[in-house]
Image (tube, coloured by chain):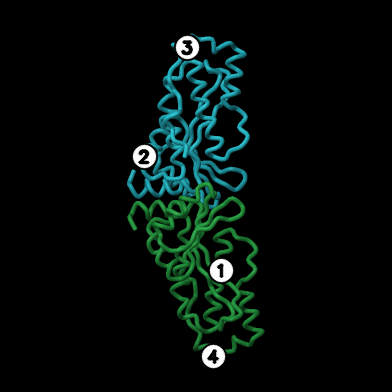
Chain colours: A green, B cyan
Amino acid sequence: METKTVYYIGGFLDADGCINAQIIRRNDYHLKFQIRVSVTFFQKTKHHWCLEKLKKECVYGSVRKRKDGMSEYAIVGNDAVKNILKKLEPAVRVKRPQLKRVLHIIHELPKAKDPQTFLTLCESVDHFEQLNFSKGRKVTSETVRSTFEQLDMLNVPVETVGTTGSDDISSD
Amino acid sequence: METKTVYYIGGFLDADGCINAQIIRRNDYHLKFQIRVSVTFFQKTKHHWCLEKLKKECVYGSVRKRKDGMSEYAIVGNDAVKNILKKLEPAVRVKRPQLKRVLHIIHELPKAKDPQTFLTLCESVDHFEQLNFSKGRKVTSETVRSTFEQLDMLNVPVETVGTTGSDDISSD
């Protein structure tokens, strides 16, 4: 990606985009939940073309027209999000805390195969509620903990729990 | 301004900024109205620092905290707006129609010393209502025309009227 494009998209993302991580319920998953990371851009559908252009430049993701007159360009999935955020990293200012935290989560996810380690990552995901001013998340690390407790999934020896603490993530 | 900065600010402006022209009532002005051009950026006051940084980069304008939790960085005045838009011109995509129209208005303003020519420029300003989805402008070219008619200011020979038509401005 050209430097000009990196900085244009970085500015666009800072002003009106969203770097996010969410916990999604997945009954068919071994750990019953999934951490989903995403990068999203918004524009009035009148300017739908500009999101299509961003998509062409970022390669990943898909653009859709919502019913409220807005269009949305969303990149989801660990590999795609990691790839695009690594490219945008030098340009992003305002949403740098979210960018760093998502990259950290993607980095730690492969190690989070046991409930306790996964739960620690979910606690990191909780921070996005405040970072993105997105009040009222339905599924938080507390939901995950409660489910794990009900299913007696947290009774594992302490030594198998990975180290995925999020203390090293700046959230200025 | 560094190329990276130009493109960052271009993206930021496209996503959540505003390039505008408005007609302001000025009883003490010879023509009773002023055309005011502006470039504005917005952010939650939590991220006030990022607007201060933009200001440092753009040099012109001022940043203020609004009472609704938002901060606003506004550049007003013909010279400042012209200077900054000329710099951002290669980077701006979505708001290119507004950028071109404001530059055109600034270019034509010195010629608009008579009521008829000024009125034609005001008609160009009217387009910003649609371009910026800013419904319900109080002062339009119709207000100006009506005032000029009341004051019998439009009775000038046709040959003194300048050519400030806006047909050459793309508004795609």
Residue underneath mark 4: A157
* First along the sequence among labels 1 and 4: 1
Lateral position of residue A87 relative to residue B67, left or right: left
Q: Amino acid at mark 4?
A: Pro
Q: Marks 1 and 4: same chain?
A: yes
Find numbered disc 2 in the image and state the secondary structure of the residue it sits on: helix
Residue depicted at 54% across the width and 13% down the height: B154
Q: Secondary structure at mark 1?
A: strand
Estimate the x, y position of residue A23 in percent, counting from the top left. Answer: 57, 71
Mark 1 neighbour density, 10 Å: few (under 14) some (14–19) many (20 or more): many
Q: Which residue is mark 2?
A: B87
* Residue hosting label 1: A22
Q: Earlier in the sequence, mark 3 or mark 2?
A: 2
Is A59 on the left-hand or right-hand side of A30?
A: left
- Disc nearest the viewer among 2 and 4: 2
Q: Which residue is mark 3?
A: B158
Residue B67 visible in the shown view: yes
Q: Is residue A98 shown to the viewer in this render?
A: no
Residue lying farthest right?
A150
Determine the CA span between mark 4 and mark 3.
93 Å
Amino acid bearing label 1:
Gln
Q: In front here: A89 or B156?
A: B156
Distance, label 1 to label 4, CA atoms, is 27 Å
Say what amino acid the circle numbered 2 marks: Lys
| Local secondary structure at mark 3 | helix
Establish whether labels 3 and 2 are both on one chain.
Answer: yes
